[in-house]
Image (spheres, rainbow, N blue to C red):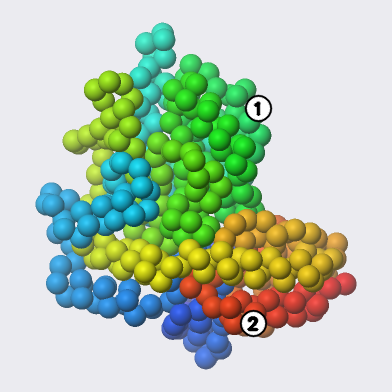
Amino acid sequence: MTTHDQFTNYVLPTYGRFPIVPDKAQGTHLWDSEGNKYLDFCTGIAVCSIGHCHPRLTQAIQEQASKLMHCSNLYEIAEQGELAQTIVEDFVKIPGKIFFANSGAEANEGLVKLARKFGHTKPAASGEARHEIITFGNSFHGRTMGSLSATGQPAIQQGFAPILEGMQYAEFNHLESVKALISDKTAAILLEPVQGEGGVNPANAEFLNGLAALCKEHDLLLMFDEVQAGFGRLGEDMAWRAIAPELEPDAISWAKGMGGGFPIGAFWISDRRIDPDTTLSSQLGPKTHGSTYGGNPLACAASLAVLAEIKEAGLCDNVKAREAQIRSAIESWNHPAISELRGKGLLLGFGLNPEALTFPYGQTSALALVLKLTELGLLTVPAGADTLRWLPPLNVTEEEVDQALALLKQALEALSA
Ligand SMILES: *Cc1c(COP(=O)(O)O)cnc(C)c1O
């Protein structure tokens, strides 16, 4: 039976899949089962952050897999301790504590629980626990019940009502819309510093700093979902620092790029005091949360290798240089089909002008362009109907970016009316 037939017969059709069967990959390149070679600017949706099968990552996994794969969080896992210290000291650089999970949705569930717990510890003046979380239109936080409830996209919640109670959706980059939703029930604000799935929309500094001020004023938690944008993707260790470096969040979630392809997620909670003798991180104390797999030795060894490579190879500098290279090329093209280039670092969204492109009825401009690019040998991913997203590995070279730009130009020409 072919892979395609197996998918038809045995795999739930939850994804619209491209007709490619990936076979192997190395660095920025991927080969399919028919031997076609692609430049990979999708990287499993921002996951393979140091490129496919990086020797450092592969070796770390191989060594750990033959030493100790899994034990349990009933024990003090050395690799987990090491990874927590690395994240707090070298990346977040604000005192706090980490919980390890296996995915982005799971990490965000932790943030939702933190907000609820905080709202119990510090209730409204009436004595009633605060439980509402303000999130944003076009956000994406995952597919579990809590995270899909936080996701401000009706299409993702369609058919799954009743969703988790207490989610309020404000307008992204619109401070007044947030103010209007704050009540004595509000406990936290949760957002992506750059919305990824929702179309590559970066928050602006004024907005983030405004949210931080509102959180201070109303005693709310400021929580960042950095699942897609964290760990170097935006050209800084942490995503929010690429936008509003002076700000200090209360909690952050990550997944995707932190494992470079090995499943791992995590969230960090600040050690700041929420009253004279209570820290925020103490809110998730003994028996409040757990995960069988979360932070197991194998996942942590993989993540340690990825984070060490990001630091030692200076990948944030490369991210900034490659972003500048892409921006200057797109500016010089002044192509009628590209209305704008949004995003930051190597989380970039080409806003497309559908009127300037010809594509089959039933497709969107982004899908048509992704299909054309795939045919030409460049893997990319749509972000909404009219945005083409590029998520190359953080160590993509100048030459590879030039090749991708040439393919993009060729694809736009092919689709131009
Ligand atoms: C992908 C993503 C998630 C969900 O992560 P999973 O690992 O698929 O559960 C959550 N938030 C953001 C911003 C994402 O990009």
Left or right placement of residue 7 versus residue 306 in this view: right
Disc with the residue nearer the chain's start (2 vs 1): 1
In the rendered image, residue 115, in percent from the top left (x then y), is placed at 39, 31
Q: Residue at x 67, y 56 (%)?
A: 342
C-alpha gap between disc 2 and disc 1? 43 Å
Pointers 2 and 1 in contact (C-beta within 8 Å):
no
Q: Amino acid at mark 2?
A: Gln
Q: How many callouts does the rendering have?
A: 2
Query: Helix, strand, or loop for circle 1?
Result: helix
- Which residue matches tag 1? 176
Left or right placement of residue 310 versus residue 363 in this view: left
In the rendered image, residue 273, in percent from the top left (x then y), is placed at 31, 27
Q: Residue at x 22, y 57 (%)?
A: 82
Left or right placement of residue 392 versus residue 61 in this view: right
On screen, 301 above or below 397? above
Query: Helix, strand, or loop for circle 2?
Result: helix
Left or right placement of residue 189 versus residue 171 in this view: left
Q: Which mark is residue 206?
A: none
Question: In what quadrant of the picture does the N terminus appear?
Answer: bottom left
Question: In what quadrant of the picture does the C terminus appear?
Answer: bottom right
Within 8 Å: ligand 1 and the Cβ of disc 1? Answer: no
On screen, 148 above or below 164? below
Q: Quadrant of residue 283?
A: top left
In the rendered image, residue 143, in percent from the top left (x then y), is placed at 47, 49
In the rendered image, residue 183, in percent from the top left (x then y), is placed at 53, 18
Q: Amino acid at mark 1?
A: Glu
Q: Residue furthest bottom?
A: 35
Could you tell me if residue 190 is visible in this image? yes
Q: Residue at x 40, y 56 (%)?
A: 255
Q: Residue at x 55, y 87 (%)?
A: 37
Q: Quadrant of residue 358?
A: bottom right
- Which residue matches tag 2? 403
